[in-house]
Image (cartoon, rainbow, N blue to C red):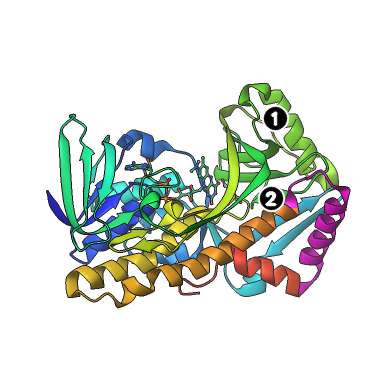
Amino acid sequence: MRTQVAIIGAGPAGMLLAHLLHRSGVDAVVLETRSQEYVASRIRAGILEQSSVDLLTSAGLGDRLHAEGFAHRGIYLRWPGERHHLDFVDLIGRSVWLYGQTEVQKDLVAAGTASVEYDVSDVALHEVATDRPYVTYVDASGTARRLDASVIAGCDGSFGPSRAEVPGKTWERTYPYSWLGVLADVPPSTDEVMYAWHPEGFALHSMRSPTVSRLYLQVPNGTDVRSWSDQRIWEALATRLGHGQDGWKLTPGPITEKSVLPMRSFVQTPMRHGRLLLAGDAAHIVPPTGAKGLNLAIADVALLAPALIALVKENDPTLADRYSGDAARRVWRCTHFSWWMTTMLHLGDDPFDAELQLSQLRWVTSSEAGATGLAENYAGLPIGF
Ligand code: RFL
Ligand code: PHB
């Protein structure tokens, strides 16, 4: 089989890339190890930056997003005795959007523009440093296949095989805590996302719809989700989010999903080797404080799609040659911001750190310069930054 672009992975990066290539008349085949149902139902990110919304809209994927997504003017920052709202629209003239990654994924599938083979196995990349790269895999029926392409896009997340084919450096930072994430069938107790510092650990209140809440608690690494009963979760959330303070109340409800998410930062540089280019989690992971993972994947693809179109249609490598450097600049900015939000809000062992965190929180909520810096990073910098 032959295609112009072989895409490994049908997450948001791979599917959006396939969609943009299709709109420009470039053929692509997407290979995905999981089933279509599994990929469509994974619960992950919830916040889209304005530039992600603009890109999805200009790619014809914005109808449901605009009808069902929610524009949020900013976020709340809370710590014992304090609640502050940072209004990004007032500060920098941009908002963020609440629209789940699950919904973005559904919209990409519904567009019907990506040719995807689900349930494949044994995916291996070959000859990526030459002009004739190819991928071998076993299809859903158990038949061994070979897919020849002009170029391969590695969009296979942090555990896929693409990254190992790119010689370079992996920069990594681990954190001594994880998140326990829950989905609950209860109207959110906040109108916009609330981040809370607390001496018992960080908590976050987000949402998916007017009737579904998404909440997170800082827990130690290695936490067994079974050690957290629903009652224990709601009690910890109430304490850390400040139930009962300044009239604010957290309403508990039935929990429908619970999982523990480890956290790390990593960046792979360069993001390209020959005819293999990486995008999204295949090239970088950020901790979720700051909601950057999905937005970075979209920003990579915004650069990668025109680069691949120029390469395969006009044999012009200019944009492809710039891709890794251009993408990595934004990646490092978001890596710093995610690290900064994470280390400002999560409890460590050292009381000195706690004082620094509170001082930083007071600064970003009382100084316009501090608040503006946070807002600019959270709401997202322009794609070409
Ligand atoms: P994805 O979504 O991981 O998609 C990669 C796809 O590649 C497939 N794959 C393979 N396909 C073929 N051959 C192989 N050998 C393959 N190996 C893997 C996988 O099955 C998958 O379908 O990466 P992509 O497209 O780069 O998108 C990135 C985003 O998904 C990611 O950054 C965010 O979801 C990160 N993230 C979160 N980000 C936030 O901003 N806020 C969040 O609340 C948030 N929660 C999360 C998250 C990531 C999670 N993961 C990866 C563990 C919660 C979780 C659980
Ligand atoms: C979410 O809605 O899942 C969410 C929101 C903000 C974050 C992380 C996750 O920083």
State left or right for residue 9 relative to residue 371: left
Q: Residue at x 25, y 62 (%)?
A: 21
Above or below — where is 305 with respect to 339? below
5 on left or right of 12: left
Q: What is the secondary structure assignment of the residue under circle 2?
A: strand
Image mark for residue 233: 1
Whether residue 285 can be seen here: yes
The reply, left or right, for residue 27 in relation to residue 61 is left
Task: Tell me residue 131's x, y (percent).
Answer: 20, 63
Location of residue 124 (image quadrant): top left
Q: Is residue 95 visible?
A: no
Q: Quadrant of ligand 1?
A: top left
Which of pointers 1 and 2 lies earlier in the amino acid sequence? 2
Q: Secondary structure at mark 1?
A: helix
Residue found at x 50% / y 43%: 44
The answer to which of 248 and 133 lies nearer the viewer is: 133
Residue 194 got which mark?
2
Our reading of the magenta stretch's main secondary structure is helix
State the image quarter where residue 145 is shown.
Answer: top left
- Spot occupied by residue 232 in the image (x, y as percentages of width and height): 73, 26
Q: Position of residue 314 (x, y in %)?
A: 18, 75
> How many discs mark residues in the rendered view?
2
**Are the residues tagged 1 and 2 within 8 Å (C-beta)?**
no
Q: Position of residue 132 (x, y in %)?
A: 18, 59
Crowding near the residue tagged with mark 2, few <14, some 14–19, many ≥20 C-alpha atoms within 10 Å: many
| Residue at the limit of the structure toward the left, as seen here | 1
Amino acid type indicated by mark 1: Ile
Give the Cα distance between marks 1 and 2. 17 Å
**What are the residue bounds of the magenta stretch?**
345-368
Residue at (31%, 56%) from the top-left corner?
153
Dot 2 amino acid type? Met
